[in-house]
Image: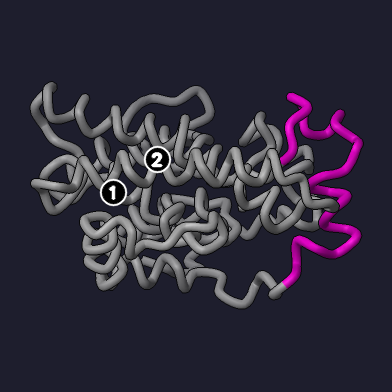
Amino acid sequence: MLGDNPKAAIDFYYWPTPNGWKVAILLEELGLEYRVIPVNIAMGDQFTAAFTRLSPNQKIPAIYDHQPGFRSAEGGFPLFESGAILAYLAEKVGQFIPDDPSGRWQCLQWVFWQVGGLGPMGGQAHHFRRYASQDIPYARDRYTKECQRLYAVLNRQLQDRPYLCGDYSIADMACIPWIYRHEWQGIDLAQYPQLHGWYDTLMAREAVQAAFALGEGWRGENDFQSDVAREVLFGSDRNRAGDGQTEEEEK
């Protein structure tokens, strides 16, 4: 549950982007007390030494669990990568991930599918459709079509079940923030009726609404279009980013 309690068990390093929303949804669904620590990626907060120690990849989200329930060399437990955070918190509390090995792995495969496919392809579509300094039709069309393919995968999976793995789980929480940006990807949800129904169901959940409202107003309409933000997110200085990649997948 959202709060600024400095004694909250979990510090949540966050900015309102799809990957940040994924973890926010789970925290709200679990009813955990957490403290939000904003990391303004448009201003370069992710490159600070303190955040880099917590998240070596210099991307949000990240958490620091002060009460991990197992011995940690630092006392608390730092964790980065949204998919890992989802699995960790779900397993810690024992909710939103199946107990049986078969169901657990079926759930995790969809989390990995989102992390490896839906997120990166959606992020590239965002970049070339919204942020690129020039229109590159080949890139724009390539990533838009790949998003269409991935949406069709979800639509098929939801043909005979209300949620991706039968019961509501972290697999659904991983995917919904990227579907939330469907218009940015050139997608018309009406073309994917099963997915559209799933989307409406999830968007009606109080925890999902609370997560999307977290940090509402922090980002301006064109905050990633400013000169500072464009240099931070898409500039030529890659030494700070470590792996040489831009951060369009965080949008």
Give the x, y percent position of residue 20: 51, 53
Residue 214 magenta-drawn? no
Q: Position of residue 199 (x, y in %)?
A: 29, 62
Give the answer, above or below, for where 30 lies relative to 208. Answer: above
Q: Which residue is mark 1?
A: 172
Q: Pinpoint residue 214: horizontal percent, then vertical percent.
A: 49, 69
- Quadrant assignment, res 28: bottom left
Whether residue 167 is visible to the viewer of this picture, yes or no, is yes
Which residue: 33% across, 65% down? Answer: 190
Residue on which the image places disc 2: 150
At label 1, the amino acid type is Asp
Residue 57 vertical placement versus 14 (above, below)? above
Give the quadrant of residue 150: top left
- Secondary structure of residue under mark 1: helix
**Magenta residues, as a range?**
222-246
Seen at 63% across and 60% down, the residue is: 38
Give the residue drawn at x 70%, y 35%.
52
> Which dot marks residue 54?
none
Compared across the picture, whether 165 is left or right of 13 comes to left
For label 2, the SS is helix
Could you classify mark 1 by the number of other residues whose Cα lies within 10 Å: few (under 14), some (14-19), or many (20 or more)?
many
Can residue 7 be seen in this snapshot?
Answer: no
Report the quarter where the N terminus lies. bottom left
